[in-house]
Amino acid sequence: MTIAATPTQVPVSVDNDKCIAEKGCTVCVDVCPLDVLAIDMLTRKAFMKFDECWYCLPCETDCPTGAVSVSIPYLLR
């Protein structure tokens, strides 16, 4: 798997202001079939650790606060 170098290179972005992972929420990590999302131990927020997204969207649709956003490339829409 390719490690995501910067947040701008990945299709899944997380709004840190909306993310409640510090309160124990791990919904986006739990529903991802590829285990590409993780919780940062320093910021205690979700982020995309590996750039291997299938654009299946459960992370975005199941997030209770709407913090997760998936950018689907134009050619896949």
Image (cartoon, rainbow, N blue to C red):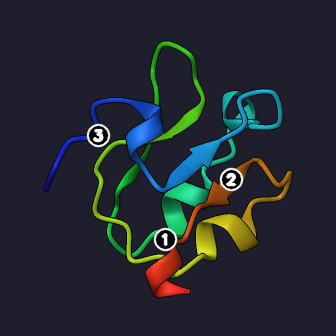
- Amino acid at circle 2: Val
Q: Are marks 3 and 1 in contact (CB under 8 Å)?
A: no
Q: Quadrant of residue 1?
A: bottom left
Q: Quadrant of residue 38?
A: top left
Disc 1 from disc 2: Cα separation: 16 Å
Q: Pinpoint residue 29: horizontal percent, then vertical percent.
A: 50, 56
Looking at the rendered image, the disc whose residue lies closer to the viewer, 1 or 2, is 1
Q: Is residue 22 left or right of residue 77?
A: right
Mark 3, secondary structure of its residue: loop
Looking at the rendered image, the disc whose residue lies closer to the viewer, 3 or 1, is 1
Q: Residue farthest to the front? A: 75
Q: Pinpoint residue 60: horizontal percent, then vertical percent.
A: 68, 66
Pick whichever of labels 2 and 3 is earlier in the sequence: 3
Q: Are marks 2 and 3 in contact (CB under 8 Å)?
A: no
**Mark 1: few, some, or many residues within 10 Å (few <14, many ≥20)?**
few
Q: Which residue is mark 3?
A: 4
Q: Could you tell me which quadrant the C terminus lies in?
A: bottom right
**Mark 2: few, some, or many residues within 10 Å (few <14, many ≥20)?**
many
Examine the rendered structure and indicate whether residue 27 appears above or below residue 72.
Answer: above
**Mark 3: few, some, or many residues within 10 Å (few <14, many ≥20)?**
some
Q: Residue farthest to the top? A: 42
Q: Which residue is mark 1?
A: 73
Q: Which residue is mark 2?
A: 68
Q: Pinpoint residue 35: horizontal percent, then vertical percent.
A: 34, 61
Pick whichever of labels 1 and 2 is earlier in the sequence: 2
Mark 1, secondary structure of its residue: loop
- Amino acid at circle 1: Pro
Mark 2, secondary structure of its residue: strand
